Image: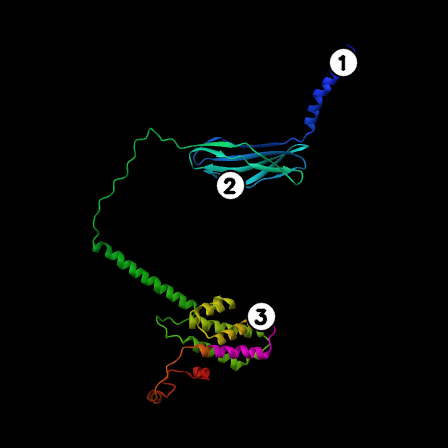
Amino acid sequence: MRFAKYYILLIVLLVALPLFTLAQLPQYEFKASVSKDTITIGDQIEFNILVALPKGYTFRFSAHTDTIAKGIEIVQPFRIDTLNTAADRTEYIYKLLITSFDSGVHRIAPQKIAFGASEPFDTVQTAAVWLTVKTVPRDTTVADIFDIKQPLDEPITFAEIAPWVGGTILLGALIFLLVLLIRRLLQRKPIVLFEKPKDPAHVVALRKLQLIFDSKRWFDDDYKAFHSEVTEIVREYIEGRFGIPALEQTTMDIVHSFQRDNVIPKALFDKFFENFATSDLVKFAKYSPSVSENESLLKFAFDFVNETKPVEEVPTNSEQRKDNDPDKMGITNSEKRVEL
């Protein structure tokens, strides 16, 4: 009997020690659930994942975007709420607003969660969650619903539609004239319905280049403005001559268009690339060109237009004698100067 009390104490220690050790172990909890396990089609509920971890632990899992399971759609992006429930434990609640438009029983697969105080993390998964989606029951108190009886077809006479057609045409014409009038007033152009034919693209380009040549702009210190103006004239000419949207394209885009359409000879193509590449450096890379490079660009612009403009038919000797007067040929003094 004297050893009985020692046996009792030993038994108490053996029972209490596992309980004490278990109490010292970190407490984890991972649980997935829905706010309602049975809904009607289109109802919105919350899908929650509760994660409880000791202080200093973190977790991660794959975020959902459009669907969480087949037939279950996500209405709003997820959010995570943090709850401090104890000094040594933190709870996190992952929330998703979901809905379903497919009736039946749907299974939300177990969600994998990685957690730990440091890498590498341990991985656990929650239990599967089941969701029952019911259809809207039919109202048995309502009698069968039939379609509305269609109206009888009655032929339409011309006299009935003639006023509407005439009024529509007249209204359309008035709107067109009003829009045309407003556009011309805003553009400060004469209010006429027909304009005289525009000059060909090469005539316009050579006229503008001649103005730059006469003003000797290549000696100015504003190289960027000079290169911008010359290259823009060439781009306008390319757009009018070849139908390539050069004003909206980069130099490389124009080069690719030339290569694709094969509209200019190889030697002229190389000169184009060389001069436009230099101009791009001047306009965008603050490159300071020499006067000779400016002259070369202007000369190239003249050559490019003259070598690619449409070929004019050569008149016979009798036609030359008959149309020897420049005024009768419809060429202005400025255009004759450009050709020189």
Residue positioned 72% across, 17% down in the render: 11
Q: Residue furthest top?
A: 1
- Observer-nearest of 228 and 166: 228
User: Which is nearer the N-term, disc 1 or disc 3?
Assistant: 1
Q: CA distance from mark 1 to mark 2?
A: 65 Å
Magenta stretch mostly in which secondary structure? helix
Mark 2 residue type? Gln
Secondary element under disc 2, as helix, strand or loop, is strand
How far across and down, in percent of the image, does residue 144 sit?
Answer: 29, 32
Residue positioned 78% across, 13% down in the render: 3
Q: How many marks?
A: 3
User: Which is nearer the N-term, disc 2 or disc 3?
Assistant: 2
Can residue 289 be found in the magenta stretch?
yes
- Observer-nearest of 84 and 103: 103
Where does label 2 land, which residue?
76
How far across and down, in percent of the image, does residue 97 sit?
Answer: 51, 38
Q: Residue furthest right?
A: 2
- What span is in magenta? 286-304
Answer yes or no: do the residues labelled 1 and 3 have beta carbons within 8 Å?
no
Q: CA distance from mark 2 to mark 3?
A: 50 Å
Answer yes or no: do the residues labelled 2 and 3 have beta carbons within 8 Å?
no
User: Which is nearer the N-term, disc 1 or disc 2?
Assistant: 1
Where does label 1 land, which residue?
5
- Mark 2 nearby-residue class (10 Å; few <14, some 14–19, many ≥20): few
Can residue 320 be found in the magenta stretch?
no
Where does label 3 land, which residue?
281
Mark 3 residue type? Leu
**Mark closer to the observer (2, 3):** 3
Mark 1 residue type? Lys
